Amino acid sequence: MPHSFSDSIVACSSPPGTGAISIVRVSGKNLTLIVKKLGVKKIDDKTSIVEQLQIKKDLNEKCVLTFFKSPNSFTGEDVLEINCHGNPLIVEMIIEKLIKLGCRRAEPGEFSMRSFLNNKISFLEAEAIDDLINATNQDQLLAASKSLSGKFEEKINEAIEDLKKLRIYVESNIDFSDEQISDDFTGFKKDLSTFIDNFKTFVLDTNSSKYLIEGVKVGITGPPNVGKSTLMNILSKEKASIVSEVHGTTRDIILRSCKIRDYEFSLYDTAGIRDQSVDPIEREGIEMAKSLLDTCDVIIEVVDPTNEDFFVNYKNPVIRVRNKSDLCNTSSKNRIDASFNNKKGISEIKDALFKALNLPLRISNISFSARSRHAELMNLCLNELESAAALSHENSLELIAENLRRASDFIGEIKSPYSSDELLGEIFSNFCIGK
Amino acid sequence: MNKFDVIIIGGGHAGVEAAYACARMGKQSCLVTNSKKDIGKMSCNPAIGGIGKSHLVREIDAMGGLMGIAADHGGIHFRVLNASKGAAVRATRSQSDRLLYASKVKSIIDSEYLLTLIEGEVTEIKISNNEAQGIRLLNGAEIDSKKVILTAGTFLNGKLFTGEEKEEGGRIGDKPSIKLADFLLSLDLKSGRLKTGTPPRIRSSSVNWKITKEQPGDNPRPTMSFITTNDVHPKQMSCFITRTNKETHEIIMKGIERSPIFSGKIEGLGPRYCPSIEDKIHRFADKESHQIFIEPEGLTSEEIYPNGISTSMPKDIQQKMVRSIAGFENAEITKFGYAVEYDFFDPRELKHTLETKKIENLFFAGQINGTTGYEEAAAQGLVAGINASLAIDEGSPWIPKRDESYIGVLVDDLVTLGTKEPYRMFTSRAEYRLLLREDNADQRLTPLAKKFGLICKERWTKFNKKMDEIGKEQERLKNYKVSLKQLNEMNSNSKAKSKSHITALDALKRPEVSYQKLCEALKIKPVRDEVAIDVVTNKKYSGYIERQKKEIKKVKKNENALIPEKINFNDIEGLSNESKQKLSVVKPRTLAHAQRIPGLTPAAISLLLVHIKKREYTKNDAL
């Protein structure tokens, strides 16, 4: 986290490397002096001028300068944007010149952070900006832009308001039970369950949106030599891992990304789980695989008819598949029958993936961008709400109240993450420099 | 010239509790009151306890205070509110015989040989170099002390209103403290005006009891104190219930512009939660009727207290309004209702010890800090008394914590949030509500009270005996097994899957299993209620308690992040003036404390954090 917010910061705000133009951005409380020292006679708010800047002793660079006067800028401070020729050397010279004039190199996310600290954007907007910038497809772009215009925050606020009403009922029936405020417990239970139903939809949307923005992490696992790598190759439509007949070939965790029905999927082909393995390297691989599977959104467990009794319990949703089903006559009881070599069962696996993740087939109805941070907090909130709903008797009102209090803390944290242990700076530092 | 350790100004509920605490802690204390006969007087309704408030009473009692004991000796009606809900929100409420209550308070105070009672009007606090050093009385006498605790209640610039009539006074029949108020205002402490009110009193023989609804006290009768038994309770009386009606509301609406609140004569804000009847009718226009509790004033009193129709309407309207109510058709009003408006001081200018930040050795407790209610006042008196005494001994202060007691919630709320309306305790103010039960106040505080030398041997022995019994009962229940069949017989939805037997202690976790049923099923003798409730509740709440404890741990990190005392909040870069001002008034001690200041945005907190880090950083650099 930066140690000062009163000094002026500078960074290249366009992507690194060569290009037609690059943009150097400066933000500070008052840039008048710096602008003057750059040799600019006069520049007005929200105007652009062309100016020859002397960036080295014998080097002048023709730039376009745009000035935004505080508080009407992105950061809420004076902001100067310098468009120069897109050469990293020129960019660096301009930055060094500005440092000589009293600026400091911006830390990652510092422009956004200043914007947030100056109350120009909310925390959720800051995140949406980051999503917008990092969007790699149109759907992501659309979702992020909707979030930026406040769609997500609006929905969060609505939920907070609804939750507040429920809490008012509970708290007033505890603190004013003698004063007959209202005691329609059945009505409250109904309101709570309606709220939960609506909230569940919101959680689903948030999850889908999270998957849209961040992609889905799929772990492929199972005993050795059942065709996990083959499955991965089919899904990612390219030959990625070495496919061989020797047990334990896939020692390392291999990652491929692919697109299935509009969503980005990261596929992790893990070492075949074979507990009796004596090879220390392979054992290490198995440990890695196990801990990786815990971080996956969904797991595909593959077996073949020779080891159908293979069964592992996972923390996360799992799709169980039997490959090589063409080699036997029986059909599997609780696994998807597949034959990867014949491309059989693939679309069933894809369907199962979407079902396990509760993903809508089409993205068109995703109306905001969300992140794991949001989804996690909302799921925690939902857990509390469901615990409250499970307490069916009025004599547990104080426990219902406690669940609702925690629920409202969790959802509140989406808007102001400060209440958690994380420092704001850590969150912003995930942004790139120049943002 | 006399020199005391502590002088306590005011003999109300805050004053007596403060004085009693100082005396118990071995301090030469002096309580100065306008009128000795009014020590421990209940100026408003004759009740102690109620939801949120009884928690405070139990905590004061656990610290060896007098309120609970006096309430038991004066109590003529006891009831447990929220009895059908869980232990954390159950609350005992008692009606007192005013005279018996006050006389018990007086006798406890009189029995303290370190405590001197002086009658007189305090006009000034002696202050030198921003340190309080004693007091000056109206007759010119001076009394010196190391600490001064001010508990002036509603007497500072008190004004009484009944309709268009206005007189000066702190309570009906008592003169206000104007000289002291003027002196205090000269100290440059932030102050404001608040108001509170009382209903008209009615001669009980003029009430038609037949058409009211009787509400007898509970049987068995609970006690307010941990060390009394209900044998000390005097004869019991019932309360009665009646209601306002359409006609009552019409009478009030017609005369509403003659009410001093609506005519603008009263500037002070009243308690939202205990509004006058004209307030209620004005704000909840669609409600056709409001409940009135008819509370007895005492065994020998001829008056009743109609709780729920506090008013400052003109006398003629009060008369009409009262007579429109069922049971009051022929009611004779013995005293008319009135509103009292008084000065209070912004509690954000106090430390958590209740010492003022501006003047050393001067403590404020009770209603002058913007609270309402006897229990809230008494709790502050206790905190001020203990801290004044600890400071004399140069011990570290007692800062009651939010996760430890309602007293902690009260003090932290006051010094952090300040208040715009009279502050009343509610259970919903305590985020760790499930930990702060009425029945475990002793477990939370009595060991601490022992450390401070606040409690007698009798209480300590009794407390240890209870703890011992709780331990034994837990052990005993652990050793009994309950079968699935037995669980089913107790109406439990048999969710026991793998285990066919669980321990009797674990069985209590199920919502349907009550202690009573369990003992019957196992054919064992139940232990006394006081012990059983702890065993049962700790088991029923166990999951929740674990999580609250985790939460406390998490907050503690920020609670331990101290803000340097010499920080100048105006130096914080980028902070808005509004935030600077908020921080400068409250002067938070810790980061967690700062986070609780209302209206301080996460952005402001981040800037504060950066500022502190930077200070440390530059300090380390300099080394």
Image: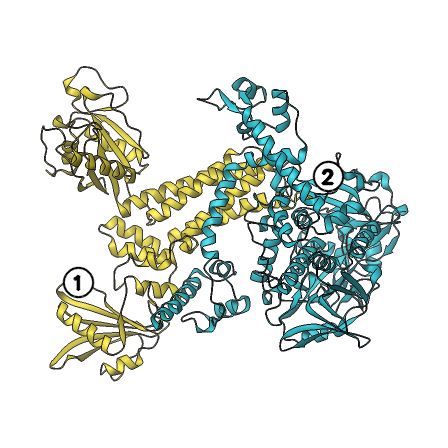
Chain colours: A yellow, B cyan
Q: Nearer the viewer, residue B255 or B83?
A: B83
| Residue at point 73%, 51% (across, down) | B67
Image x and y of residue B122, in percent = 77, 71
Q: Nearer the viewer, residue B224 or B456?
A: B456
Image x and y of residue B140, in percent = 80, 77
| Image quadrant in which the C terminus of chain A is located | bottom left
Which residue ends up furthest to the top in the rendered image? A329
| Image quadrant in which the N terminus of chain A is located | bottom left
Please give left or right for residue A52 compared with residue B51 in the image: left
Identify the chain of the residue marked 1, using the numbered disc in the image: A
| Residue at point 35%, 65% (across, down) | A115
**Label 2 neighbour load within 10 Å: few <14, some 14-19, many 20+:** some
Q: Please name which of the two marks, 2 or 1, marks the residue nearer to the observer.
A: 2
Residue A205 at least partly seen: yes
| Residue at point 32%, 45% (across, down) | A209
Quarter of the image where one finds residue B81: top right
Q: Secondary structure at mark 2?
A: loop
Reply above or below: B322 against A117.
above
Please give left or right for residue A66 compared with residue B250 in the image: left
Quarter of the image where one finds residue B257: bottom right
Q: Nearer the viewer, residue B507 or A44?
A: B507
Reply above or below: A244 against B150.
above
Please give left or right for residue B612 compared with residue B420 in the image: left
Image x and y of residue B462, in percent = 68, 41
Q: Could you tell me how far apart the alpha carbons at marks 2 and 1 are, in whole angstroms?
A: 76 Å
Identify the chain of the residue marked 2, using the numbered disc in the image: B
Reply above or below: A325 against A426.
above
Q: Which residue is mark 1?
A: A16
Amino acid type, callout 1: Pro
Q: Which residue is mark 2?
A: B222
